Each structure stands twice: as structure tokens, then as C-alpha cells.
Image: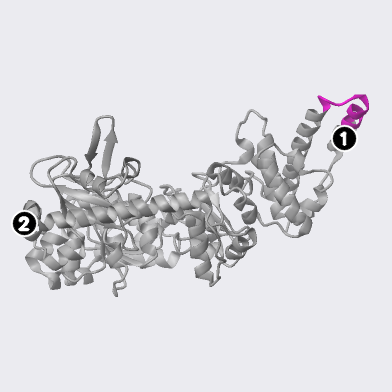
Amino acid sequence: MYYPDEVIDEVRLQNDIVDVIGQYVALKKKGGTYFGLCPFHNEKTPSFSVTREKQMYYCFGCGKGGNVITFLKDYENYTFPEAVQALAERAGIRLPEKEESEEDRRRKALRDRILEVNKKAALYFYHQLKSERGKRAHDYFVGRGLSEETIVKFGLGYSNPYRDDLYRAMKKEGYEDGLLAQTGLFTIDERGAFDKFWNRAMFPIMDANKKVIAFGGRVMGEGEPKYLNSPETMIFDKSRNLYGLHLARSTRRDFFLVCEGYMDVIALHQAGFDNAVAALGTAFTPQHANLLRRFTSQVVLTLDSDGAGQKAALRAIPILRSAGLSVRVLDMKPYKDPDEFIKALGAEAYEQRIESAENFFLFEIRKMRERYDLSDPEQLTQFHRGIARRLLEFPEELERNNYLEAACRAYQIQPQQMKQLVVRMAARGYVPEPAEEPVRPAPVYKKKEKDGGLRQSQAILLTWLAEYPALYRALNGRLSPEDFSEGVYRRAAQLLWEQLAQGPADPARIIDRFAEDEEQYNEAAALFQARIDDVDSAQARVKAAEDAYRRVRRARLEQETRSADLAGLQKLLKQQEALKSFRLRPEDVSL
């Protein structure tokens, strides 16, 4: 679907980027910028920035950047028109009905056909489960305590013990190899075509909108791997989907249960806990946490009670906390997982365990306590120091004191002594960076490039010209788009000059003009996020701007001297000499 620029601009302007991204990422304000953990790559310290004034986001860690439309496009795996449509609906904007571009039509058609194949595969597996050949898998599900209603509810199935059974079924439906190869259900190469899943109890994986996007399969009998998941495809990213979310999103409970496997989720739902979800064969990720945050503010971890499950809980806690979620941990001992627990003690006992679920901090302290022999004075001291270090991770004094008192009550420690220990450790430099403190981006001027920092200087000028209206007035006539390197730099400069000639800059609109090429798009976004290290005063900012201007102009003049005649050369030399005396004022680089 093609939309005119003015329509795209209206949609973008009516959707504040901080409000929209804040629904997916926990953002904390620092100065005029918001920071959070990047949803596009794994990181422990926030380097993902969102600027309301520019209506742009940029990650200094992975280089991903853009505006509110491209954020939704990349996060939700939408096409560009789909992202525009979603944001228009959010803002109550009625979009004109226009013809889709050929590229959009192709991408949407491919996506729809992959979803169509997955849906038919799910139905095929279900029918096989109900046939005589599926008796073994059906007996497995019934043996695990599942009712027929639950089997239907989750669309469970069976893949026959033939390596090309599903492939032959899909070929009869008229699907070509090129499409089938992109579904993740088949391996098609010079040796032939083979099903990824065969002789397995099948678990369809659905997205939040109840569309089948992938599958998981448990082998029947001997075979490796025991559990197998679909590979990632155009419609399936395992780090951004949770098993059972299509049902859990409708729960009336105000929290989600996070467990480990398919059967745990299914057993919990069957027992009445319709708020259960699980990660899909991968470690818990920030993307999972951000996805949960769209539907709840509270999480109860009900991971396996063995060593691996407890370690997984310890790894998940900081990820969930960084997304702004409240976290508790459920104790299932002496049973391993929710499925075993409910079979043994029932849903009512599990409900009681939920009500008594342990606060995340006390859980972490309890697991840390297991490493020490508290009858040994030296190890007891080390344990107390470990608690103090953990308390230093809370940036707010009130929150830190609340947890301090809770830990002291649990382990018979004098609160005043713990407070003194925390203060001493802070004075010795044990204070970790607060969660809201972003990683300082690598200074632009410290990167070594073959062009002597020319492109870095151009990026600084573009960033500051967009930020400081007075700088454009001071440089206009002295500097032009032709002074910038050909390609993205010059095109971005031309668009910026056009905007500044008519009013304030709108970088978010400029980068839209690069949407057709993802590499150029990210490069353009970075041009308006350039930073210089150690520029913390008006005087330093003036000097940096002057240096950047001189470097850019000098490069252009040197280029022109190569083809100039005598008269032109004399003129260029005078301009080069004038660069030495050029000066900016502090008000030229301030708001």
C-alpha cells in the first residue's frame, strides 16, 4: 500500500515516539533523552535512546535507528504500510485507499501464503493425531493427563513416521518448492525434499493474534533431539514470541506465569491458570520481557525447581526487572515443574504457592546464601557483603531501605549495621551503574577513519544544525549540501536545508525518505544522533562546531582546487584563508 508523504507525516506526528516505544520498552528519562534496553539486540546496560524533540530512536550499541513508524515495523515484523496502518488506527486517522506497491504486494502475499501453509500443516497434524496412525501420540497426550478439550484447544497433532509425509500432502495442495522451503517445515536440496518433523507429537506455536507461525515437536520413542522447534522464518522469531500468549493475553488475572515448556503451559491452562506462557527453546530475552510488558506489569516465575531451572530464574530476573516488571518466584519443591506439581497436589495447592511466591530479591539472596556456611564467621561476613552489593543496585534510597530491612528480617541482621556496611562499600567504589544510566556512546571524534574524520564532522554538523536553529542562520551561505559527501550524507543535507529554509528541522521525516534501503535508513538515522565526547560547556561546543565546519569546508575547497583555473584558484585560496578567522558565538549552538 502506497501512502502520500503528507499522510505518512500526519500519522507520524500524531503518534508520539516516547509514548509508543514506551509500550514496548521500559524507558527512563535522563536529561532530554529517554534510555532503555535495546529491543533489537541483547544488552545489560541501556544504550537505546529515544528523543521526543527529534521523534527518533537510536541504539548506540547496534546502530539501529529510525522513527516511530520504522520502530513498529521492525519490532512487530510489519511491512512499512502495515506499520502506518497500525499507527493510524491508534491515532484515529482514516487512511486513503491506495494501491499497494509491487514490492509490498509481493511481501504481503509471501507472508500470507507461509501462514496459509502453516495453518494447513497444523490441521494436517491434528487429523493425523485423530487417525489410527496417531494413536501413539494421542496416548502420549492422554497419558500426560490432557483432556480431549485441551488437545483441541491447543491444536495438538502428530507427524507421521515418514520423511516426506507432509511434503507430499502440501504438494497435492499445489504449493511449489520455493514457497515450502521458506516455511521452516521442510528441507529441500539436491538430495530431495524432507519434512523437518516426522514421528513427533506436534505443538503448533501461535502468535498473539492466534496465527500459526511455527511448530514444536516431541519425538515418539527413541531419537534426538527429544524436542525440536521450527527454525526462524519470515514470520517466526523465537526471541519475540511466547508459547501460549495467544490464550494468556485474554486472562483476567493481573499477572503472568512464566514457565519452561509446552506441557507446563498446557497443564496450567487445563488446571485453570490461563495466564501461563513459556519461552520457545531459547533463553529468556529482553524481547520476551518487552512482549510481556505489553500485557501485564507482574510476572511469577514458575521455572523448574532443579539446578538448571533455578539458574534460568536468576538469569531472567534482571531482564524482567529492566523491562519494568514486578517479579516473584514460585517454589514447587518437592516437584520439578508445574505439570508434576498439579498432578500430585492439584490446582488449589498451586494457587496457594502462587500467593506465597517469593519476592525476586529475597529469592536471589536465598540462592546466594546457599553458597556459604553461615557457621563460619568469615563466610558469614562474605554473605553480608554480598547482600550489601545487591542492595547497592537499587538507585532509589527508599526502595533500597525497604529491601535492606526485608533482608535483615530474613537473616537476623541488625539493620543499622547493614546500612553502615552499604555506606562503606559505596565509599570504596562498589556502586554499580544505576539502571537509568546509559552506556556513553563512543565519541564520534575518537573513531579513526581514513577520511581524517570528515564524515564524522559532517554527521556532527547535521545533528547540530537540526538541534540548534541559530547554527543554520550562522552557517547558511557559508555551507551548503554540496559540501557533504555524495550519497546518504548529501541527500540528508539537501532535505535538511529544505526544511530549515521553511522552519524547524524534522529529522524523523528526513529519514523516511531512505525507508526503501535498510542500510541507508540506519545510516541516515545515525547522522542525526552524532555525539562528541567531553563537550560539556558552551565554549567546548562552539569550538567543536567550528572545527567540524572548517574540516568540511576545507575538504570541499581542496577538491575544487584540483580543477580550478588560475582565477578560480586565487578565489579558493582566499576562502581557505578566511576559514582560519571564522568564529561562532555561544548562542549559535544553544537552544
Label 2 packing within 10 angstroms: few (<14), some (14-19), many (20+):
few
Judging depth in this view, the residue of 184 and 101 nearest the camera is 101
Q: Position of residue 82 (x, y in %)?
A: 48, 59
Q: Position of residue 206 (x, y in %)?
A: 29, 58
Displayed quadrant of residue 402: bottom left
Res. 279 visible in picture? no
Q: Position of residue 27 (x, y in %)?
A: 49, 60
In the image, residue 384 lies in the stretch drawn in magenta: no
Q: Which residue, as the protein is rendered here, is positioned at the far bottom?
A: 252
Residue at screen point 56% across, 47% down: 516
Task: Look at mark 1 in the image and give the residue it sits on.
Answer: 575
Residue at screen point 24% across, 37% down: 193
Q: Amino acid at mark 2?
A: Asp
Q: Secondary structure at mark 1?
A: helix
Judging depth in this view, the residue of 316 and 76 nearest the camera is 76
Specify the principal SS of the magenta part.
Answer: helix
Q: Position of residue 591 (x, y in %)?
A: 73, 59
Please give the label number shown on residue 139: 2
Q: Which residues are magenta?
A: 561-573
Judging depth in this view, the residue of 388 and 247 nearest the camera is 247
Tags 2 and 1 touching, CB below 8 Å:
no
Position of 339 compared to 495: left or right? left
Displayed quadrant of residue 396: bottom left
Q: Which residue, as the protein is rendered here, is positioned at the far right?
A: 567
Position of 231 compared to 267: left or right? right
Residue at screen point 82% across, 50% down: 474
Position of 301 compared to 98: left or right? left
Displayed quadrant of residue 131: bottom left
Q: CA distance from mark 2 to mark 1?
A: 87 Å
